[in-house]
Image: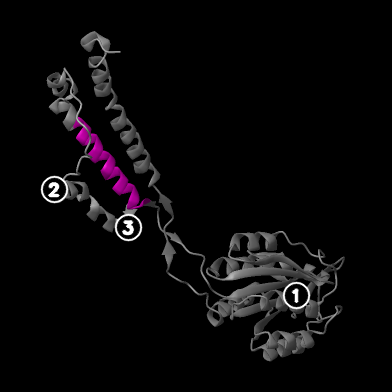
């Protein structure tokens, strides 16, 4: 739709008519008289026909209306678009260590490894976080920022889907993952800073201990929700069939302490259903902020009426030339003999 930024300027539309009606005519400058032998013939020679005069007045009024229209700043408003919503700053830290290869989960009726389940369930969680800025950290022997904080949830999920086991090393640096998340989150002005840490093992390598990193996170106002993957019986294929052994060395005590230190919670998911319930619980504990504000893109249109007014003004100026030419021809040597 079309709107006007300054619609009150339309009040000046009758201004030329009011000036002509209310103000006296401008006084002509005094000058010495010049006697011409053809004086009586001048009015007939230079007079403008009534039709042509009305046409010129129409051009002048049209140019004036277009100038006022341009001054009122017409603009085209596009369809409403949702603003980037201001919610939480939420980082996901996903373990890519070698133990994530364990196929002790089932997805859609078939056995899959732990990372495949994390991708499926966490991907749906990412899609629901409308309004939040999400970031992704992948860690193994080292921790790497894969995706900085962004409203682009599709990119975050794509980066998670492309992650492979061992990309960051085969060991587990939980403390380093927390440190990288805190470094990225504390640089933001946002107060709602959340880290979801997902791992299936204990800290075995790294430059900072997990509990020390948790204390730093608490001082920076970062809440950490820890999710323990696995921990249940693990099926192992052998030449003698499937054997069951004890789960990985999941350090539940440390993960619980990290969550408690930062005001978060600890969850353990021994199967895909439980992991889905964990993310549903996280949605409840940290609901995304949904703002209903929107904006409409605006495109200025003032240049069109202003350009038309310029063209009409030029046409109006050109209409004065034929009258001047007639006067010149009348005053030439063919009528007066003067040179």
In the shown orientation, is residue 113 left or right of residue 292? right
Distance of mark 2 from mark 1, alpha carbons? 77 Å
Q: Nearer the viewer, mark 3 or mark 1?
A: 3
Circle 2 residue: 21
Q: Which residues are magenta?
A: 55-75
Q: Whole-percent x and y of residue 69? A: 30, 48
Q: Residue at x 71, y 88 (%)?
A: 256
Q: Whole-percent x and y of residue 128? A: 54, 68
Q: Whole-percent x and y of residue 125? A: 59, 70
What kind of element bears circle 3?
loop
Mark 2 or 3, nearer chain start? 3
Mark 3 or 1, nearer chain start? 3
Question: Which of the pair 167/194 is nearer the observer?
Answer: 194
Q: Residue at x 69, y 61 (%)?
A: 159
Q: Main secondary structure of the magenta part?
A: helix
For the residues bearing labels 2 and 1, Cβ distance under 8 angstroms: no
Name of the residue lying farthest toward the front: 32
Q: Nearer the viewer, mark 2 or mark 1?
A: 2
Query: Is residue 178 at all visible to an observer of this figure?
Result: yes
Mark 2 or 1, nearer chain start? 2
Q: Residue at x 56, y 65 (%)?
A: 127
144 magenta-colored:
no
Question: Which of the pair 62/157 is nearer the observer?
Answer: 62
Q: Quadrant of the C terminus?
A: top left
56 magenta-colored:
yes
Identify the disc placed on residue 180. Answer: 1
Circle 3 residue: 6
How many numbered circles does the render carry?
Answer: 3
């Amino acid at each position: 739709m079309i709107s006007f930024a300054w619609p009150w300027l339309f009040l000046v539309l009758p201004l030329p008519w009011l000036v002509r009606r209310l103000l006296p005519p401008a006084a002509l400058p005094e000058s010495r008289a010049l006697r011409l032998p053809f004086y009586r013939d001048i009015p007939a020679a230079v007079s403008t026909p009534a039709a042509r005069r009305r046409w010129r007045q129409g051009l002048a009024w049209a140019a004036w209306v277009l100038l006022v229209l341009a001054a009122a700043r017409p603009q085209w408003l596009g369809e409403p678009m949702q603003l980037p919503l201001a919610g939480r700053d939420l980082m996901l830290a996903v373990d890519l260590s070698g133990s994530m290869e364990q196929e002790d989960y089932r997805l859609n009726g078939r056995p899959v490894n732990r990372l495949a389940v994390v991708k499926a369930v966490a991907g749906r969680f990412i899609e629901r976080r409308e309004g939040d800025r999400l970031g992704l950290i992948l860690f193994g022997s080292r921790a790497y920022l894969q995706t900085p904080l962004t409203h682009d949830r599709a990119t975050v999920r794509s980066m998670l889907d492309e992650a492979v086991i061992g990309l960051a090393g085969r060991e587990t640096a939980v403390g380093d993952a927390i440190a990288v998340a805190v470094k990225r989150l504390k640089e933001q002005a946002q107060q709602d800073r959340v880290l979801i840490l997902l791992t299936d093992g204990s800290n075995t390598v790294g430059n900072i201990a997990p509990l020390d990193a948790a204390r730093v996170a608490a001082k920076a106002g970062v809440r950490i929700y820890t999710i323990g993957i696995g921990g249940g019986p693990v099926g192992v294929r052998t030449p003698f069939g499937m054997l069951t052994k004890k789960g990985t060395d999941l350090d539940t005590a440390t993960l619980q302490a990290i969550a408690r230190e930062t005001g978060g919670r600890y969850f353990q998911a021994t199967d895909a259903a439980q992991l889905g319930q964990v993310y549903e619980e996280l949605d409840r504990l940290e609901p995304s902020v949904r703002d209903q504000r929107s904006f409409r893109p605006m495109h200025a249109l003032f240049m069109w009426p202003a350009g038309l007014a310029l063209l009409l003004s030029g046409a109006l100026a050109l209409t004065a030339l034929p009258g001047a030419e007639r006067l010149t021809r009348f005053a030439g040597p063919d009528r007066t003999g003067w040179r």
